[in-house]
Image (cartoon, helix red, strand yellow):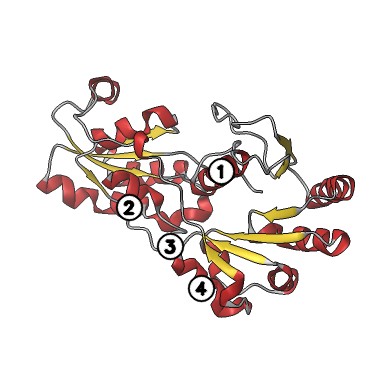
Amino acid sequence: MPDAYSGFGGIAQYNRDLLDALLSSDRIEKIVSLTRHFPDSGLSFEPPSANLVQYFLPGKMPRYVMAALGHAMKLRPDVILCGHINLLPVAALLKKLTGTFLILEAYGIEAWKRQRGLRSWGTQQADLTIAISRFTRERLMSWSGIQPHQIRVVPNAVHLNDYSSGDKPDYLVQRYGVEGKLVLLTVGRLPGHERYKGQDRIIALLPKLTTRFPNLVYMIVGDGDDRARLEAVVSTLGVEDHVIFTGRISEEEKIDHYNLADAYAMPSTSEGFGFVFLEAAA
């Protein structure tokens, strides 16, 4: 898996919920998770069961392949769950060597475009594919040759108790100095390869927006290596007084940040699911 209990973002959340559901079953004896990243700092996500064993294997792919091969040959698992199409060549190889039932997880953008070489071959080795949405299901089938009976939609879990509307939290109003301000919010990671989320488009509109709404503040929740570029754009446009970069926030504070906002905007051109839109509307 790329991320689960060790990371932030939509894919990590989806994988946590999926593993939580599996671990709640008395039919599951053990799950071994081979994660491609070290845990992000400040995480508080704990697996719900000791039946999950996690190994963190960042770095070069050969190390990951050897570790996966070693665990597969030792454990002889009943199921291999591949959490990202980029890892599919490894998962398909393990299936060939062990004869294990292989499930591919298709989250979003990475599964929409035609894959070549080993990734394309790997889609044909999956015994079952689970897609996060009907849209991802259709896009994946359009190029992969996966048949309708081989793919199922398994949508995001919904934690109804985690969402509620309410007044603007005083502690956040004071933290960010937004008393009497009109807060426009975007929540999302800021990696350079995910510029499609559209924070820069909103920043580009701020000179016009703030002319009409002088008390407007654009709050960007999230962090990543693209933040420096966005901050430079803000400075170039001279709208520093109208933009707040909060950095990464805790899950416990996320709903309060939604309640702090007067409006939510994210003009994204591509989303695997766009769970933040549902969170903002809850």
Whole-percent x and y of residue 200? 36, 52
- Give amino acid for label 3: Ser
- Give amino acid for label 4: Arg
Q: Which disc number belongs to residue 270? A: 3
Mark 2 element type: loop
Mark 3 element type: loop
Dot 1 corresponds to which residue?
A: 21
From mark 2 to mark 1, how far is it between C-alphas?
30 Å
Mark 1 element type: helix
- Give amino acid for label 1: Ala
Dot 2 corresponds to which residue?
A: 266
Dot 4 corresponds to which residue?
A: 139
Q: Which of marks 4 and 3 is nearer the N terminus?
A: 4
Q: Which of marks 3 and 1 is nearer the N terminus?
A: 1
Residue at (75, 63) in percent of width and height = 89
Q: Residue furthest front?
A: 26
| CB under 8 Å between discs 2 and 1 | no
Which of the pair 67/21 is nearer the observer? 21
Pair 4/2: label in front: 4
Which of the pair 43/101 is nearer the observer? 101
Q: In which quarter of the image is the C terminus?
A: top left
